Image (cartoon, rainbow, N blue to C red):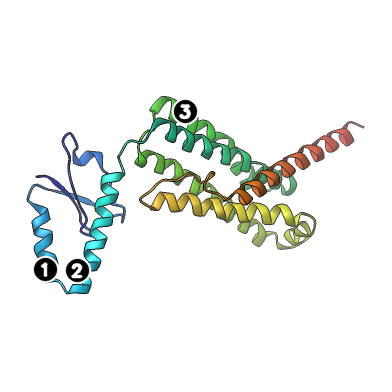
């Protein structure tokens, strides 16, 4: 028998036929994976018998979670499920673009401009990966989710930096645009939690469809109103500029 063993938490996974250590990068806990040909299961059982009862129960649960993660992380998913997960993530980023774009135009803060550009580039990257690289495993979709989580974390950090560096301007802007600011901040937190939760967990869910009907309705309405307002203001500015 051949096993992968986590050097950090002690979790183990029996390699199946055709699998090798190169197919796995690291354990869920972040530990390095080692390779062992011994009957590791028996060794673990003997080790647990030497431990106290409470610690043994905890250690067993910890290893079981790691084993489940290592077993599931490279399981192939149904193609239509993967396509929905990737396309919905691209949809979330594209629709959320209106907020960093609005802040970039209104406040001339360069990081918002960069973030708005990434909101457009990342969905294109996801489409390329899905059509050319054929994403079809949990491990691969987790990487997509990790990128999305990083995007929303960046938005929150940039927003807070802008507030701190331009407190007076923020106070004035908040009086006039409190709704859009609060809306974008809250939904960035929601999507950050959704993506990081999936990235760190053992299961994969769709951050868009997992929203309650009320939250989805509020999000769609918020995006629609913000987009309509942005276009209206943009047209007015052009007209004033021309005349």
Please, what secondary structure does the residue beneath circle 2 have? helix
Between 172 and 190, the residue placed more toward the observer is: 190
Q: Label 3, label 2: how many angstroms apart (C-alpha)?
A: 47 Å
Image quarter (top left, top right, bottom left or bottom right) of the C terminus: top right
x%, y% of residue 21? Answer: 20, 42
Q: Determine the residue located farthest toward the right in the rendered image.
A: 243
Question: Of residues 52 and 180, which is closer to you in this image?
Answer: 52
Residue nearest the viewer, comparing 173 with 66: 66
Neighbor class of circle 3 (other Cα within 10 Å; few <14, some 14-19, many 20+) is: few
Q: What whole-number distance in Å separates the C-alpha atoms at marks 2 and 1?
A: 7 Å
User: Mark 1 or mark 2, which is nearer the start of the sequence?
Assistant: 1
Q: What residue would you read off at disc 3?
A: 128
Q: Furthest-front residue in view?
A: 213
Q: Which quadrant, please, contains the N terminus?
A: top left
Residue identified by numbered label 1: 49
151 sits to left or right of 132: right
Q: Horizontally, is 175 left or right of 114 in the view?
A: right
Task: Look at 81% across and 40% down and name the residue there.
Answer: 233
**In the foreground, 22 or 200:** 200
Q: Quadrant of residue 136?
A: top left
Give percent across and percent down for residue 75: 30, 39
Spot occupied by residue 201 in the image (x, y as percentages of width and height): 38, 52
The label shown at residue 56 is 2
Q: Are marks 2 and 1 in contact (CB under 8 Å)?
A: yes
Residue name at image x 68 percent, y 57 percent: 182
Q: Secondary structure at mark 1?
A: helix
Residue at 65% from the left image edge and 56% from the top image edge? 162
Above or below, 64 relative to 209: below
Q: Secondary structure at mark 3?
A: helix
């Amino acid at each position: 028998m051949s096993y992968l063993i986590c050097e950090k938490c002690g979790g183990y996974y029996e390699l199946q036929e055709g699998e090798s250590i190169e197919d796995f990068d690291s354990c869920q806990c972040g530990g390095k994976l080692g390779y062992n040909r011994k009957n590791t299961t028996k060794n673990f059982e003997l080790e647990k018998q030497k431990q106290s009862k409470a610690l043994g129960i905890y250690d067993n649960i910890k290893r079981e979670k790691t084993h489940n993660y290592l077993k599931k992380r490279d399981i192939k998913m149904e193609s239509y499920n993967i396509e929905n997960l990737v396309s919905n993530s691209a949809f979330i980023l594209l629709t959320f673009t209106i907020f960093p774009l609005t802040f970039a135009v209104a406040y001339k803060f360069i990081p918002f401009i960069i973030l708005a550009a990434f909101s457009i580039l990342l969905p294109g990257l996801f489409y390329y990966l899905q059509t050319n690289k054929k994403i079809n495993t949990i491990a691969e979709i987790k990487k997509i989710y990790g990128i999305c989580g990083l995007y929303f974390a960046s938005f929150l950090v940039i927003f807070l930096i802008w507030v701190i560096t331009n407190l007076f301007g923020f106070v004035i802007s908040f009086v006039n645009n409190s709704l859009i600011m609060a809306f974008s901040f809250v939904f960035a937190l929601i999507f950050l939690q959704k993506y990081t939760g999936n990235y760190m967990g053992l299961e994969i869910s769709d951050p868009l469809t997992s929203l309650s009907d009320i939250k989805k309705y509020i999000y769609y309405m918020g995006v629609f109103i913000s987009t309509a307002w942005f276009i209206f203001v943009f047209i007015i500015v052009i007209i004033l500029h021309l005349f």
